[in-house]
Structure formats: structure tokens, C-alpha cells
Image: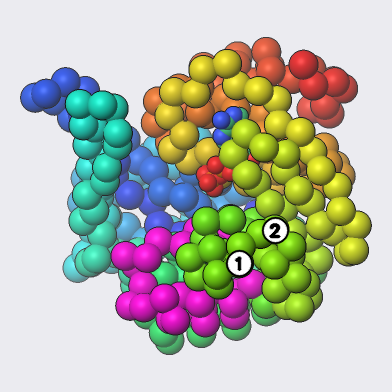
């Protein structure tokens, strides 16, 4: 049975239902990826590591993780802090903006509250947001943990997911993101992140930088444009199936990674994985919210791809 450890922060998401009512859901980049990985590869043990509080809201978050089939054994409980929260606001022209209450969340103290499991995983996934919310000793601890998983054969997966507000300075972000890149085997760099942090003006500059850090597999997702894969000196380009109506691109990248690593864990090539990642993301951007309802998800995904019984893509539509 494949296994994947995912480490990060899940938050309460509040979004307007009407001018007087808010919807409450749970979301966060690594959590979103964990959900889409599990939905795509139900046999996989997806262990999600975060920290929550001892209140009813934290319990609802854990219940939601369990409903999605995630393994919550390693979710830590803080006695003093609770979960972070963000509010989505939409202006008259439909433009979305976000307000955050996460600076004192339990997850900031994650690695002081939980010792990561001393077992083997096929994959371990962290993002730049996971790194950004931790203090320096916890970041160092996380790097040691990743090195130890890697030694035991895990594929370390990293998406820099640069959020300037979570870092003290650009320099700080650049240094830490580079160290985590150097600790990974599979990376999902973003063009905007690299332009902002490293002044990389094109894909070649990104790939050159990452090759120097000895990353085995680099996957560049670029919205509706082709996905570019660089794997051990080989470059392939995979087309993205068009999406008729893009409703909400929140978590497109997270969903893509969930679909991609599900396919890799099931033994497929990077090219098949890219097609699956794009199909998953294509479904997610067709509806509102980071985590789309499971029934909508399953029916839209099977309409989008033709698969055999073991989930293999036979032909994309
Ligand atoms: P991020 O959310 O990290 O910025 P992207 O915008 O590159 O990521 O989107 C991730 C994936 O979502 C893309 O590789 C693609 O598969 C899918 N996607 C995003 N936007 C579109 C779009 N307009 N049409 C079709 N697919 C899209």
C-alpha cells in the first residue's frame, strides 16, 4: 500500500454565502493536496501532520480530515492555541481578496508539539508555507527529518508556494526555500514565485537554478499552458485539457500536485501524472472553493478522463 506523509497547516475558511451569512469550510495548501491525493488514490495511506487546538472547531477540522479518509494519527493538540482562519471577500467585480488570522495558530508550533513518525513513507510532501510558518529551530528540525526520510527511501516533494507576508524578508524566503529545494527530489516551482524571489525571467533560468541543486524531477505548471517536465536531463511537454468555464482557480496548483503525486505513487510516468494532475485541477477550477464536493468531483473527473479499472488513463478526452 503506498504511503505519503504531508506536513503543513489547515485553516478555517470563511466565505460569503450572502451579505449576512458566511460559509465555513477547512482548507490550506498542503491539506488541499492531501485531500486530492486521497480522492485519487484511495489505497494510499495519506498521513496529514498539523497542530490544532482543544476546542470544538479543531475537532470539526479533524472530523473533516477523517471524512476525507486522511490518517490523523499525527495531528498534534495544543493546549494554548487553536487553528488559524481566513476570510474570503469578493468585491463588486468578483475579484477575491483574503484576510488572515493565523499568526498565533497552533500549527506555528507544530514540530514542538509532535515528533514525526519514525517509519518509512514512499513520499513526504511539504510546501514553502509549511516552512514559512515555523520558527528557525523548527525549520532546521524539519530539514533533519526530511533528510532522514530520504535516507530511508522516501521521495521528498516540495512546492515553494511563496507568500511574501509570511516571511520577514525576501532574502529570508530565498535562503530557506533554496535549502528546502536542495532537500527534495521532486519540485513544483512556480514562474511568479521565481520571478519575485530569484529574478528568473524564464523557465530556462528556473531549471538551471534547480539543476544546480540536484533535483531529480522538476515540474513546471503554467496555468492553461503546457506542463513542462525536466527529469534527469530529459525534457517533456504535456498539454493541458481545456476547461470550458473557469469558476474559481483557488487551489488549482494544490489539486494538480495531489493528482500528480497520486499517479506517481501508483507507478505511472511523469507524463501520465501530469495529465492526471491537470485533469484534477481542471475539475477543481470548474467549481467554487479549494475543496470541491466529493460527489461533484468524482463525476466531473470521470467525465474528463477515460480510465481503466486500475485508474490508468487510456485516453484523455
Ligand atoms: P498555481 O495555482 O500554483 O499558480 P497554476 O495556475 O499553474 O498553478 O495551475 C495549476 C494547474 O491547474 C495547471 O497546470 C493546469 O493543469 C490547471 N489550470 C490552471 N488554470 C487553468 C485554465 N485556465 N485552464 C485549464 N487548466 C488550468
As drawn, 58 above or below 96: below
Q: Main secondary structure of the magenta part?
A: helix
> Is residue 24 visible from the viewing direction of this image?
no
Instruction: Pinpoint residue 304: horizontal percent, then vertical percent.
Output: 69, 18
| Horizontal relation, residue 37 to residue 285: left or right | right
Instruction: Pinpoint residue 244: horizontal percent, then vertical percent.
Output: 57, 16
Ligand 1 in which quarter: top right
> Is residue 55 visible from the viewing direction of this image?
yes
Q: Residue at x 88, y 64 (%)?
A: 232
Q: Residue furthest left?
A: 20
Instruction: Pinpoint residue 224: horizontal percent, then vertical percent.
Output: 62, 34
Q: Residue at x 21, y 31 (%)?
A: 91
Quadrant of the drawing holding the C terminus = top right
Q: Secondary structure at mark 1?
A: loop
Q: Nearer the viewer, residue 40 or 97?
A: 97
Q: Is residue 224 magenta?
A: no
As drawn, 243 above or below 179: above
Residue 151 lies in quadrant: bottom right
Mark 2, other Cα within 10 Å: few <14 / some 14–19 / many ≥20:
some
Q: Is residue 161 magenta?
A: yes
Distance CA(mark 2)–CA(mark 1): 8 Å
Q: Residue at x 67, y 77 (%)?
A: 182
Residue 247 lies in quadrant: top left
| Horizontal relation, residue 106 to residue 254: left or right | left
As drawn, 129 above or below 274: below
Specify how the rendered protein is coloured. Answer: rainbow
- Residue assigned mark 1: 200
Segment tinted magenta in the rendering:
159-181
Q: Nearer the viewer, residue 65 or 156?
A: 156
Which labelled disc corresponds to residue 203?
Answer: 2
Amino acid at each position: 500500500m503506498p504511503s505519503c506523509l504531508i506536513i503543513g497547516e489547515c485553516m478555517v475558511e470563511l466565505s460569503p454565502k450572502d451579505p449576512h451569512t458566511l460559509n465555513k469550510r477547512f482548507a490550506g495548501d498542503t491539506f488541499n493536496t492531501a485531500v486530492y491525493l486521497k480522492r485519487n488514490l484511495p489505497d494510499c495511506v495519506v498521513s496529514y501532520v498539523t497542530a490544532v487546538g482543544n476546542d470544538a472547531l479543531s475537532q470539526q477540522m479533524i472530523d473533516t480530515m477523517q471524512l476525507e479518509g486522511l490518517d490523523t494519527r499525527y495531528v498534534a493538540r495544543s493546549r494554548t492555541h487553536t487553528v488559524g482562519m481566513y476570510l474570503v471577500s469578493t468585491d463588486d467585480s468578483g475579484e477575491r481578496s483574503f484576510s488572515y488570522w493565523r499568526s498565533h495558530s497552533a500549527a506555528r508550533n507544530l514540530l514542538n508539539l509532535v515528533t514525526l513518525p519514525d517509519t518509512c513513507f514512499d513520499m513526504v510532501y511539504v510546501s514553502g508555507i509549511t516552512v514559512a510558518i515555523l520558527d528557525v529551530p523548527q525549520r532546521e528540525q524539519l530539514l533533519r527529518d526530511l533528510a532522514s526520510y530520504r535516507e530511508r527511501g522516501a521521495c521528498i516533494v516540495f512546492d515553494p508556494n511563496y507568500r511574501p507576508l509570511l516571511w520577514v524578508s525576501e532574502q529570508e524566503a530565498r535562503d530557506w526555500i533554496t535549502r528546502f529545494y536542495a532537500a527534495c527530489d521532486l519540485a513544483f516551482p512556480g514562474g511568479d514565485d521565481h520571478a519575485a524571489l530569484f529574478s528568473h525571467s524564464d523557465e530556462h533560468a528556473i531549471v538551471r537554478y534547480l539543476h544546480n541543486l540536484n533535483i531529480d524531477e522538476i515540474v513546471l505548471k503554467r496555468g492553461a499552458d503546457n506542463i513542462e517536465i525536466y527529469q534527469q536531463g530529459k525534457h517533456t511537454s504535456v498539454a493541458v485539457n481545456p476547461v470550458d468555464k473557469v469558476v474559481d482557480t483557488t487551489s488549482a496548483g494544490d489539486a494538480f500536485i495531489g493528482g500528480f503525486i497520486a499517479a506517481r505513487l501508483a507507478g505511472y510516468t511523469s507524463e501520465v501524472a501530469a495529465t492526471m494532475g491537470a485533469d484534477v485541477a481542471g475539475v477543481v477550477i470548474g467549481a467554487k472553493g479549494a475543496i470541491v464536493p466529493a460527489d461533484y468531483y468524482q463525476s466531473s473527473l470521470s467525465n474528463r478522463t477515460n480510465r481503466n479499472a486500475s485508474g490508468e488513463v487510456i485516453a484523455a478526452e
